[in-house]
Amino acid sequence: MMNLIILGDYTSVYLGAAWGVDPTPVEKIDHLKSNLAEAD
């Protein structure tokens, strides 16, 4: 199961790079981090 997850991650990164899209920003995770920082 872990191999499939890793394969999917690598595939999305390489497809993003091939299409000229930066795959690193994840807006939902950034939003979650900011909400968690405000909760402290």
Image: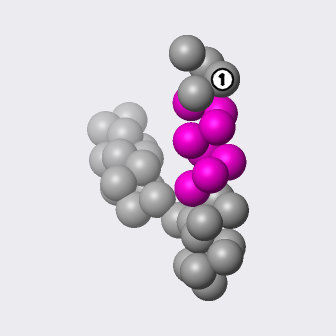
Asked if residue 7 shows in the view, the reply is: yes
Residue 14 appears in which quarter of the rendering? bottom right
Question: How many marks can you see?
Answer: 1
Circle 1 crowding by C-alpha within 10 Å: few under 14, some 14–19, many from 20: few
Asked if residue 38 shows in the view, the reply is: no
Residue 29 spot, x, y in % from top left: 42, 49
Nearer to me, 34 or 21: 21
Which quadrant, please, contains the N terminus? top right
Residue 34 spot, x, y in % from top left: 39, 53
Q: Residue at x 66, y 76 (%)?
A: 18
- Mark 1: which secondary structure? helix
Residue lying farthest to the bottom in this orientation: 20
Residue 15 appears in which quarter of the rendering? bottom right
Nearer to me, 38 or 32: 32
Which quadrant, please, contains the C terminus? top left
Q: Which residues are magenta?
A: 5-12
Q: Is residue 9 positioned above or below 19 on the image?
A: above
Q: Is residue 14 positioned above or below 35 on the image?
A: below
Residue at image mark 1: 3
Q: Residue at x 58, y 27 (%)?
A: 4
Nearer to me, 8 or 28: 8
Residue lying farthest to the top in this orientation: 1
Residue 9 appears in which quarter of the rendering? top right
Q: Is residue 35 magenta?
A: no
Residue 10 spot, x, y in % from top left: 67, 48
Colour theme: one colour
Taking 27 as reference, is 21 left or right? right
Q: Main secondary structure of the magenta part?
A: helix
The kind of residue on which mark 1 rests is Asn
Q: Is residue 15 positioned above or below 36 on the image?
A: below
Taking 3 as reference, is 40 left or right? left
Q: Residue at x 57, y 56 (%)?
A: 12
